[in-house]
Amino acid sequence: MSVNFREYKIGARMFGLALGGSMLITLLLPSFDIAASVSTDVALDKQLSAGWDSGWQLGDPLLKGHNKPVKVLVKNDPLTGVALAQAETVYVYPAGTSLPNGVTHSDNLGAGVKDLSLEKGKIKDAKKESGAVFLINHGAFNGNNLPYVENATATKGWTPDAVMAKADDANVSHVGSGKTMFVREGCWWCHTLLPEQTQDWQAFGTPPMLGDFNGESPTAFGSDRKAPDLLHVGSRNSSKEWMMLHFFNPRLVQPHSIMPRFDYLWGEVDANGKKIDFDKWRAEYNEYHEGKRVAAPEVPMYAKDSEIRGLIDFVLSLK
Amino acid sequence: MSWIFEKPLVTLSDTKKIESDKVLWEAEDLGGITEDNNRVPVPIVWLVALTVLTAFAITFPLWGQRPTAAIYAEYVQAMDKPEIKAIQSDVAAIERIVAMSQGSQYNAQLERHPVTMDDLRILKPQIEELTKKGVDLKDYTVVGAQVVLANFEGNFRADGSRERQQPWWDKGYTIDIFYLSYFFIFVVLIIKRLPPSTWQPRHGGEHK
Amino acid sequence: MLKYLFAKNEDIPAGSSAIYFGFSSIVWFVIGTGLGSFNAAKLAFPDAFVGGGEFFSFGHMRQVHVHAVIFGWISMAFAMAMMYITPVLGNTKLWSEKLGVWNCTLWNVGLSLGLTVLWAGMTSGREYSDFPWFIDLYLAVAVFIPLAVNVWMTILTRRTQGIYTTNWFFAAATFMVIIVFIVGNLPEFFHLTGLTEAYLTWWFAHNVLGLWITPVAAAIAYYTIPKVTGNPLYSHRIGHLHFWSVVVFYSTPAAHHLMSSPLPEWLKSFASVEGVLILVPAIAFVSNILLTMQGKWNMFVENLEVRFTVTGCLLAIPLNMQGGFQQTRAINWYVHGTGWIVAHAHLALLGFSTFLEGAAVYLGLQTLMKRKLYSLTLGNVHFWMLLIGFSIYWISMTIAGLIQGAGKIYEVPYIDVVIAEHPYMIARWLGGTMVFISNIVWLYNMWMTAREGTVVPAGRMPHEMAYER
């Protein structure tokens, strides 16, 4: 045990210096740039509609799409029933739902957006226990027009229950639980959410800006593109029917697609509560595929509380 | 631990340290493995130097940019010329515009990103609007029918705004130069503390 | 093995934990490549194997394949090499065989649990750090910290004054992987969001490869080649250049994975220059190993371990040429997000790294069990099927990637790219399946070595004896 460590003391210190220096440059320095980013409208919409987190979380350990807000188009004032001059998109967090990152950690919103959200938006009045309704508003800060989060429960008295009681189901969009499905089903293994600023397919649309991600988790950019980018897919294709066929069996609408079938997201029953006979459907599809049937079997309409509803809502929300 | 700087390229250690290092080097059995004291071969030194130069050269934004608004600015101006307005056919008009812009610094990019008259009609008001604002058109890229701000978070301009372009130099490159220098200085110091490479340990003895 | 969990440390035969890790790693390799082959089949034939459930869906299985090979096969083969090589180089015994046996057991349990939850879709949604944070914590606390303790304590209680290069790498890498695990998963522990989350995801992904897989794989070659050939390592000096450049350069280029995201450009400039400089450790490593081979090149043909190691070492050349240059601004835009990168990742993990640690597992298991390899023929079958299968995979995915890159520039409708890639998807499946089958052969060969391999007499090394079958 009479070991001479002299030289390795120097080596160990140099090692610490090398690794520490590397982490200083690659972690500490960029953190100032990233922390300085200011949320855009896109970022606020994404974080309010996806909620706290879309990966594994204690509030939704099996990633069933729980602990999520819904996005509702409000046409009449939920309190008075009077028609609004302009329909408002609100994000309803029922009681017990984790609040979004910008509300719990308002620094994430960035300078200006944070100040407006705290002062005008009253976001600190929102409580997880009682739930809240948020919307995106705009205001002036140091001469700039900035978006901010408004806690409509505090500013207008719109409670989650009141909004949901008046909401027509057609105007309710389950974007939040859909993002969970997007993560859980691994859509991002093939579909990126990042049109590149260097040359890329123009059809994929505009690359995202620095402030477009604040409060989003996970960002699910994806890295291994085996299929089109989806960041703006809702602008290219807004047909719910097409999405439905495509998810049930992509080969129904795109014969050369290599995308897996997501028919299992329909669950047990269809919109009418009738049990879906998947085996029969597949057998008939195979006959159709082999040319023994003229038409492909009908794709069942999904139930209101099915997982596919959220996923389709999410994909269509990607404008 | 004393340092000797008489022949820095041979060794930086004094005779006493070198001798004790030599004894240890030859005597020690590291699980039956031995090491030689060969110098870093000259071709390897050159290869490393070449790597450093290449690293900077190829990190510059040479290719792969989306078309910027700047490359179409001349086209847009040409559209208002009476000569072009007089041409009835769109195909002939765009051919004439392209011919007029020969010699533009953006020739290569224009060739890669050709447009039709219809495209230009959509881009024209957007590009004119930006020109009026006096912004740098190179900060804007043409995505489909839209002219949008690029997301490159580049260098800061004097007025505090960002250049929306991939930079040819920025503080990242500057940090690199310092970082590299520290590395090579330290590694050379470490290596030169060893006995000179003219000396090779004699292995054998009790080794199997 | 399990009986040693509650035995006294002194009663556990030396090498037990290494053997345990060795066989575990091969089993995980079979499982991991089997999943890979299945996944590739899903891409080639999307309407085959439709079970109607989420458990056979590509999106649920891809990450299971990736994590089985990285944390099962590669990392456990590393642990095997450490349990065996670290004490040898210090002329001592492993600090604690008992800790090693527990380490391997907890590793197998934790990984099985982790892969099960991933399979069920319980993911953090972050590439390479897909495990939910409770699994990440488990891996840090029950897997990597005990491993580091055992390696560090073995080095500290060595009976030599110096520390051989391999052990520098082992000591540094076991420390760095813990840092990488803890810092890289901060977004999950503390719910960091947005671009911070995206950047740290790639900081983790880059560094788990750069500060764990690459240096440990290279360190193994620093042991295998001098040991088996009997040559001295060519240059201690190049060893210094290699070690320090790994720590300094390989730890910095994380941002080059996000060259087209709106990260600050200065960070991309810095990361990208550093990214090319990963060629410095690569040049040092390859030159040192190949120069050590001087006068013993016949063993490249005759000896299985040397052949594996030198092949891995040669594969490091295209690997680092790709890795260094594909991330730069001038090139990244063309290949980013295409099959090219998939091919590159397999060149790193299935080419370079697998061949190096394959040699260590072959050599270590024979040495520790004191049994000569059961069959050279099966060893050769394993080697060639692995190499050819990998090559088919790599070439087909590289071509597919170039097709995608060209499609991007010429604005080809995406579905046409999918159609053009289809033959290469089939080729990838064939190559991957060859790799899978070769590993079954390997497992059988190692199993038979344990049972029926010729006993190596005391004082002799397995590579000194002739192959018998």
Image (cartoon, grey):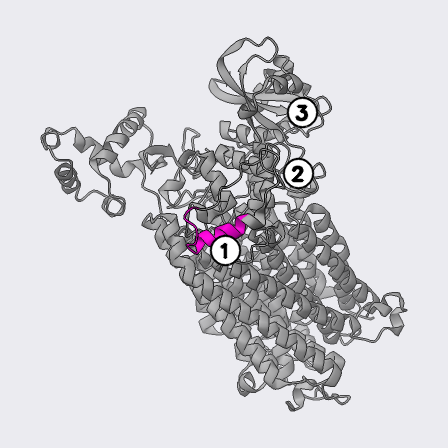
Q: Position of residue A173 (x, y in %)?
A: 55, 29
The answer for how far apart the CA atoms under marks 1 and 3 are is 39 Å
| Subunit of label 1 | C
Check disc 1 and report the residue beneath it.
C46
Amino acid on which the number 1 mark rests in the picture: Pro
Say left or right for C146 vs A252: right
Say left or right for A71 vs B106: right
Tags 3 and 2 on a common chain: no
**Which residue is located at x 67 percent, y 84 percent?**
C373
Q: Quadrant of residue C39?
A: bottom right
| Subunit of label 2 | C
**Which residue is located at x 48 percent, y 34 percent?**
A316
- Neighbor class of circle 3 (other Cα within 10 Å; few <14, some 14-19, many 20+) is many
Q: Position of residue C407 (x, y in %)?
A: 35, 52
Which residue is more in the foreground, A30 or C45? C45
Q: Disc 3 vs disc 2: Cβ atoms closer than 8 Å?
A: no
The answer for how far apart the CA atoms under marks 3 and 2 are is 22 Å
Amino acid on which the number 2 mark rests in the picture: His
In the rendered image, the vertical position of residue B21 relative to residue B173, given as above or below: below
Amino acid on which the number 3 mark rests in the picture: Pro
Say the numbered circle drawn on residue A94: 3
Q: Nearer the viewer, mark 1 or mark 2?
A: 1
> What is the secondary structure assignment of the residue under circle 1?
loop
For the C terminus of chain A, the image quarter is top left
Q: Which residues are magenta?
A: A281-295
Say the numbered circle drawn on residue B122: none
Mark toward the start of the polypeptide (1 vs 2): 1
Q: Nearer the viewer, mark 3 or mark 2?
A: 3
Q: Position of residue C116 (x, y in %)?
A: 69, 54
Say the numbered circle drawn on residue C191: 2
